[in-house]
Amino acid sequence: MDLGINGRTALIVGGSGTLGRAVAAALLAEGVHVVLAARDRGRLEEAARSLDGAVTLLTVDTTDEATIRAAVEQAGPVDILVNAAAPPAQTLDPARSHEADEVLTAFETKTVGYLRTMNAVLPGMRDRAFGRVVNISGQGANTTVSAAGSVRNQAVITASKVLADAYAGTGVTVNVVNPGTVTADPSPTIAPATAGESTPEQVAALVTFLCSAPAAAISGDSVAVGHRVRGVQ
């Protein structure tokens, strides 16, 4: 299938992480110009060396709107935005997951960071009548194990739907991808109340399709990768 994005520019925020690198590799294979953005220049350079293709590297802090605006300006017209810049679920402190400060920090570093990057690129996408935004959330949105994890992921889903509706009919789509545990060797076993596992490449395949021209009719959706939490409708 021709995904129709050859020559487009993709900004991957959180591009130095496992999922960011996998998405970058998949988009490079489609002829997309990839811009990797993250806080740590050293990790960005390491990510670039692991990829089969030239990429642009930009340092950005999603808690600082000025650095986001500067990165978007340097990237040039951004056709595709992938938000993957958030601490992994396993880094959240389970002993503090119900504390208000922990919930606020998780919300700020993920949901609000995603909102800042979306607001920086969406008006330009609308003006050019083409744009694809894919936000990486997680199946923790469907569980009640961690208030911090659930709130930040549900908030990403809600904010993405709001912006998808705000830009409906403009050629711009906004969607969410919800991985379960991501691992190089996923288990086929899915226990009750647990999400299925998936590889980074499987997550990247879905992200890439949602970034494509044929996916123009999909917006405001939230899609699981790895079997959706077993026992949850």
Image (cartoon, rainbow, N blue to C red):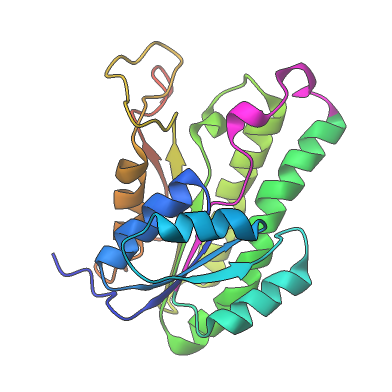
What residue sits 25% from the left and 68% below the top? Answer: 30
Q: Residue at the right extreme?
A: 101
- Please say if 7 is above or below 188: below
Residue 203 appears at what percent x and percent y? 36, 44
Q: Determine the residue positioned at 40% across, 17% down.
A: 231
141 up-or-down from 49: above or below: above
- Residue that lies at the very extreme toward the left in this rendered image: 1
Looking at the rendering, the stretch of residues picked out in magenta corresponds to: 80-99
Residue under the image location 60 percent in, 48 percent down: 156
Residue 174 against residue 5 in the figure, above or below: above
Is residue 205 one of those drawn in magenta? no
Residue 163, located in which quarter of the rendered image? bottom right
Rendered image quadrant of residue 214: bottom left
Q: Is residue 86 magenta?
A: yes
Horizontally, residue 110 falls left or right of residue 122, namely right
Q: Quadrant of residue 4?
A: bottom left
Q: Is residue 48 visible?
A: yes
Q: Return the residue nearer the eye: 15 or 159.
A: 15
Label tally? 0
Q: Is residue 214 left or right of residue 108?
A: left
Where residue 130 sits in the image (x, y, percent)? 41, 80
Whether residue 218 is visible: no
**Left or right: residue 113 compared with residue 7:** right
Give the x, y percent position of residue 201: 31, 44
Query: Relative to the observer, which residue lies in front, 103 or 77?
Result: 77
Rendering coords of residue 18 (x, y %): 46, 44
The quadrant of the picture occupied by the N terminus is bottom left
**137 up-or-down from 147: above or below:** below
Rendered-image quadrant of the C terminus: top left
- Determine whether, in the image, residue 21 is placed left or right of residue 156: left
